Every structure is written in C-alpha cells, then in structure tokens.
Image: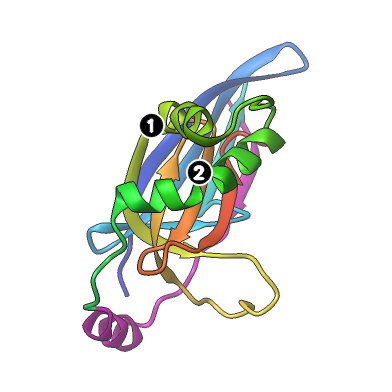
Amino acid sequence: MEMSPYVRFAKAVENNKQKGYRIIFGMRLRPESLYLESSHSVMVEVIHGQVTQYLRDMVYVEEPEYLKQEVTAKREAFSVINMIAHNYTYIASVLSESGYDFSGLEGEALFDAVSDLVVFVKAGYVKPEYAENKENVLFPAWIVNTGSTLIYFDLYSAEPLGHTDLWEE
C-alpha cells in the first residue's frame, strides 16, 4: 500500500563541535500518520555536510488488510477530552521519566499541569513495541504530543499503547 513521507521534526545537533541537523520523517497512510513506538520511519543526521546516521524502519501494509480493518473499524472513537481525563496520571508518569516534576500535585492540579503540556492530539496509527506485537500490526490511536514525547492511546478504549521520546539520542 502506498505511503507518503513527510518531515515530522527537524532539530539542530552538534557532534565534536561540528554542527548539523537531525531530520525525522514520518509516513502517512492515507490521511492518517503512522507512528512507531521505539523508532522512526526514517531518521537522517547530517553533520558538517555529511550523513552521519541513517535509520530506516519501514512498515509494510497490505492494502486488502488495511481496507478490511478500515471497514470493520467504524466504531465510535473515545472522546479526546475524556481520554486525557481518564489517563492524565499515566501521562504524568511518562513525562516524569523525561524529567518533568509533578511532585506535590494531585487531582485537579495534576490534571491542569498535564493538560498545559499537551501541544496537540490527533488520530493516527501506531505500531507498539511489546512482546505480543512481533508482526506489523497497526492500531488506530490517539497520539498525544507534548513537544518532547508522543504518547499513544487506543482510539476506542483509551488504553495506553506506549510512548516515544522525540529527541532521545
């Protein structure tokens, strides 16, 4: 099935006092974006005019299987607001791993602090990296972007599916 690449993020980097860029490409599967929990579709790092890193982790999607899933997935999505309200403590625990400090916050104060960090939420597909998912299985998901982390939730049940730190080395 045809997928379209796009620049998801670009960041200035430095290695041994030489400057360059890290460019992370995403893939679109029809109108929706595809996310890989522990990787990126394509990542290129260019330092001082030379490619110093190249990562390619592509997922092959068979069109008949995608279309079959699309037809059977005509269920009602979990609402975005309720998904965040249902999972704000999980989001806080993920962000705590990245250095955010939520100590002393609970209840409404914690919800407000977490909500303030959400840059946007959109629907897409995610390939989680857990033991039962050795195949190229994609899940419809809500993608919560906090600017530094993407956190994935099942589109229909709002259950956590995993997360990706955007700029981990």
> Dot 2 corresponds to which residue?
88
Query: Disc 2 on helix, strand or loop?
Result: helix
Q: Is residue 130 at least partly visible in the picture?
A: yes
Q: In terms of image quadrants, where is residue 118?
A: top left
Instruction: State yes or no: residue 50 in magenta.
Output: yes
* Of the two numbered discs 2 and 1 in the rendering, the one whose residue sits closer to the viewer: 2
For the view shown, which residue lies furthest in the right direction? 16
Residue 75 image point, x, y percent: 24, 76
| Residue 169 lies in the magenta-colored region | no
In front here: 104 or 45?
104
Q: Looking at the image, which residue is at 26% across and 86% down?
A: 72
Confirm whether residue 169 shows in the render: no
Residue occupied by mark 1: 119
What residue is drawn where x is 63% and y is 15%? 19
- Quadrant containing the N terminus is bottom left
Q: Position of residue 8 (x, y in %)?
A: 41, 40
Q: Is residue 53 left or right of residue 4?
A: right
Q: Is residue 3 above or below residue 62?
A: above
Q: Quadrant of residue 94?
A: top right
Extreme front residue here? Answer: 107
Q: Nearer the viewer, residue 162 or 15?
A: 162
Give the mark nearer the N terminus: 2 vs 1. Answer: 2
Residue at mark 2 to residue at mark 1: CA–CA distance: 14 Å
Q: Measured from the top left, where is residue 15 in percent x and y?
A: 73, 20
The magenta span reads: 49-73
Residue at position x 43%, y 70% in the image = 139
